[in-house]
Image (cartoon, helix red, strand yellow):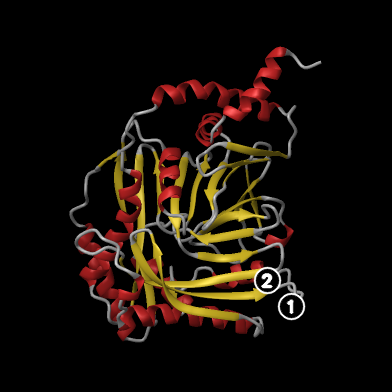
Amino acid sequence: MVSVKEEKQVSDLVLLQAEDIWEALVSLGYPGAIWKLPHTRDIKLLISIRDGIKQCQPDIEKLSPGFMLSPFHWEETENVSFMEGDIIITFSETGMLQNIDNHIGEEHPGFKKLIRTALAGIGRRSKSEGINHFMLPGSEDPDARERFKRTVELAVAAIRQNHFHKVVLSRTKELDIDNNFQPITAFQKLAGVYPHAFVSLVNLPENNELWLGATPELLVQQKSGGEFKTMSLAGTQPAKNENGVVVPKYDIRWGEKEIEEQALVSRYIVECFKKIRLREYKETGPKTVLAGNLYHLRTDFEVDSHALHFPELPSVMLRLLHPTSAVCGTPKTASLRFITDIEGYDRSFYSGFLGPVQIEGDSNIFVNLRTVRLKDKKATFYAGAGITEDSIPEKEWEETEMKIDTLLQVITKS
């Protein structure tokens, strides 16, 4: 027999919003991820209760529904982090609960605890409405600009000495987090502002950190119907003019440096296809695309993996593509060695890859760009710039600032 208390709890589930369940899983120490795919309306929230974060091979076609995460420094024989989808919840774009896909059963103590904690949070949510969520500037490193510009100079010199053709150098910017700042609110803002990006928030309790981001770069996508897709994305310029007005796509002009940078990434993908003797692909582009406050050049590549009887294609291409020349350089080995020797810090999950796997039969793995790590009351923003022999150090610094501001301006807005 179901008690009156239990009946009320079930009826109250419809009142739960994404922020209630997210705050509950964080407080309980459950690994989880919430995301919104490009050009979609639904928000998905995945919670891993039984096994936490596992380490496994990224064999996409063999995995159960879950969420995958890998750092930048990852070799194709190494494992990746994987969160099993014990509970997968669908919300509308306004954050209202639509469906709970519960793979562990309603009687599981972890599920019961999650729901009780989330329901208790409804009252706290109503009390916190109207609070501004913002971040306070941290102590700026006065040498950061000159240090980055020096690494660009070293990269240009190495390119002119034919050590490699292109390298992607990155940097960080650290801010202090105000006590009122709520990551789930920042996620919701990003999801609303960037409908063309993969927006995600990932909780890693073992590391005591969260990763928030809005990335425009798809690494591999595999649809249940057999459609495989990847893309090359490179070249960057502001989307708005000095008056803050978005410049129309047809008015955008690309320089030789950006065109060559994007062509290098596209050629890299084609070379990966050649390695596996894949000739049946469709290439579209390059075209100018909007990503937040920035324009990029993008070329799409599509393959029918079912027609080719190649179910392993996404796993094979993931291993071949990462790290792409859009986050590393070309040739891969030489540029990666330069990054490791010169960049001077650990990228961690920045420019690695992440995304949902086998959710309703589809897998979508993205390059982790436009991202910020939230840890110990510090927000660490990451950004990179593609360096070629035509690169100007000051302009490359400005490009990284633009990319950081793309994220920062949204999540610090009241």
Residue at position x 23%, y 63% in the image? 147
Residue 39: x %, y % from top left: 52, 58
N-terminal label among 2 and 1: 1
Residue neighbourhood size for the residue with mark 2, other residues' Cα within 10 Å, grouped as few (<14), some (14–19), many (≥20): many
Q: x, y percentage for residue 267?
A: 49, 83
Q: What x and y, as percent, mark residue 116? A: 61, 23
Q: Is residue 330 visible?
A: no
Q: How many marks?
A: 2
Which of the 4 image quarters holds residue 304? Answer: bottom right
In the rendered structure, the answer to whether residue 290 lies left or right of residue 42 reads left
**Circle 2: residue type:** Leu
Q: As drawn, which residue projects farthest toward the top?
A: 4
Give the mark toward the camera: 2 or 1.
Answer: 1
Is the residue 159 above or below the residue 36 in the image?
below
Q: Quadrant of the N terminus?
A: top right
Q: Amino acid at mark 1?
A: Leu
Asked if disc 2 and disc 1 are in contact, CB closer than 8 Å, the reply is yes
Q: Which mark is residue 308?
A: 1
Q: Quadrant of the C terminus?
A: top left
The vertical placement of 276 against 233, above or below, is below
Q: Residue at x 44, y 24 (%)?
A: 126
Q: Which mark is residue 313?
A: 2
